[in-house]
Image (cartoon, coloured by chain):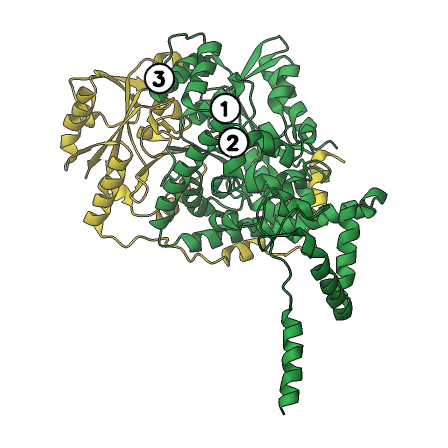
Amino acid sequence: MSIVVGKTSKAPDFPVAAKAALKNDQLRRNVHHATNVIRNKRALRVEEMPDWEQLRSAGSEIKAHTLAHLDHYLIEFERNCELAGGKVHWARDADEANKIAIELIRHYGGDGPGVEVIKVKTMTSDEVQMNHALEAAGIKPIETDLADMIVQLGNDEPSHIVVPALHKNRFEIRDIFRDKMEKPELTEQPEDLTAAARGYLRERFLRTKIGISGANFAIADTGSVCVVESEGNGRMCVTLPDVLITLVGIEKVIPSFADLEIFLQTLPRSATGERMNPYNSLWTGVTPGDGPQAFHVILLDNGRTKLLQDEIERETLQCIRCGACLNACPVYRETGGHAYGSIYSGPIGAILSPQLQSLEHSRSLPYASTLCGACYEVCPVKINIPEVLIHLRGEVVREDQKTLSGKLSAENIAMQAAANIFLSHRRYEAAQRMARIGQTIFKRDGQLTNLPGMAGAWTRSRDLRPIPKQSFRDWWKSREKKDGANA
Amino acid sequence: MTAREEILASIRNALEVQASDPAGSHARIAQGYNRIGKLNHEARLEFFIDRLVDYDTEIIQVTAEAELPGAIAEALQHAGEDRALIAAAFPAAWLPASVSFKVDNNLPTSEIEGVPAVVTTCEAAVAATGTIILVHEGAQARRVLTLLPDHHICLVRRDQVFELLPETLIAIAAKAAKPITTISGPSATSDIEMTRIRGVHGPRRLTVILYG
């Protein structure tokens, strides 16, 4: 098994990448602007819903319920999809998913070089690095979502789950399009850039015989797939080709068509701040005379079943990829998505990436948060992201303690000593007395500055008040004595 | 073991408690949110129109079916178009004589591309979100017909308009396995600096004709 989440395994630690991102003023301006716009629109669209909290609760419960019966619903989806003329494949990991896709493309598109496929935005295909695998097999994937095109043509990586090119402004996009579309006269007006994308893709939509999509929802009781989008490129990709291949993470299944009444209300408002996104496409297997006449679904595990075992970790699989937590996160809003080193960035990325892959990759991500809880507040399926982050921090520490260097690390020794001190009030009070004496040389203007060793990491950028001359416990004791004397 | 067996086995190993009745526990999940609207007919339509306008949809209002040919002609004329596609099942009595219609008898894509407009009916509409729902059968046309033309003219009968999404989905549930497209305004993108641009790949113009 080789579980792959984009290029996460090769990414630098978050603090290192974040430092570089923070120096890029243009990037920070772009990210600030975009996240501000979506946050404000979302707030407006959520406020007008009197039953928002009930929708969140119901969505969360439906997702939790589905995960608790995941085998049942996957089998039901498979049965209904195949009854309607679709074919369901199962993939344990990224490699297997890519192999299945490549075999299908070869089968329908022939072995010759230069076979093209059109793709509609799917984060799951970025997760398994499908474009990379297709190109290695001589197949040319064409991304059709405007933001994905910007990322693909610019040899870039997505920096946001919903708006992958949010780190680029109009001038940067114009330069990419001028260069790659050979349109030197193109202006930076969003209307012109959008029209250029339309012109560039139109003929490709019409000639390409194989389409690849992801799925927002796979519906068990009908065997249908639902794709949520805005531009119409999704409709093109699932309608025009002769063959359609849909890659679906196993957590995307929902029990019934009726459940859409919740998610089609919460997803668009959370993702883009719209009451409803311009288009939702639903299809079931193959419809004679309408749309692709061959339909294949690839159900992908790639680490997801591992998360089911633990109830705290399992919650992560409830995610419907709306990206609201990214826009709300004070850390993401400063660094943008690339610093996370994973195609899944922001708060959800900080819990999803390290759990899908083993913790040794992206082990810095559970710390890429202030635990302020803004992500939890906006999550339309109520994933308690701060709780999962703390859980994962615990896992990182437990992993470290298994190794000799981890056991002997200054942090571990200090934490063990602290645990020991907190166990006994005598030791605790003795430590306080010692600290009171020791701290005097670090006091400046009533604050502790430049503490040595690990504590220095804290005092470099934060205020720390010294331990007062008298603790509450000391005061209480002296008060008792005084009372006793008075009596 | 096949991948299927292996994935299902690891799911079953991970889930300690296997409840025996998924359908029952699914049905017990509280639907505390609003599922059925409260507005009366007039208020509901006003709500719908307000939301359509908000998403750049053009609206033509008529009463009798006999006025439909005139409304369709007006919608096309307003856009400067003289040709349109229709499904074979589209009622001939609603067609204006002044316009040439291309009837879809399994037209190849090459003959659909290039026709500027399409006229369809719909299955239902949602006032709260300004959404029309197509179940692609009969006069609602195949998916490709409603996608390639730059102008989609959609006839919505007033009693097809529901207030909220849940009640609308309940009403169309029997057709859930047909190809379905929900449409809320013309195609759009906000991918460049979050500026909403109308019209990317789908129809750049959407006209709703309310009748009945």
- At a point 65% along the width and 24% down the height, the residue shown is A98
Q: Secondary structure at mark 2?
A: loop
Q: Which mark is residue A148?
A: 1
- Check residue A192 in the rendering and tell me which mark sits there, or answer none: 3
Q: Which chain is green?
A: A
Residues behind callouts 2 and 1 on a single chain = yes
Q: CA distance from mark 3 to mark 2?
A: 37 Å
Q: In the shown orientation, is residue B140 left or right of residue B91?
A: right
Residues tagged by mark 3 and mark 2 found on one chain of the structure: yes
Residues at marks 3 and 1 touching, judged by CB atoms closer than 8 Å? no
Shown colour of chain B: yellow
Q: Which image quarter is the N terminus of chain A in? A: top right
**Mark 3 or 1 closer to N-term?**
1
Q: Which residue is mark 2?
A: A285
- Disc nearer the start of the sequence (2/1): 1
Residue A41, x across and y down, in percent: 37, 40
The amino acid type of the residue labelled 1 equals: Asp
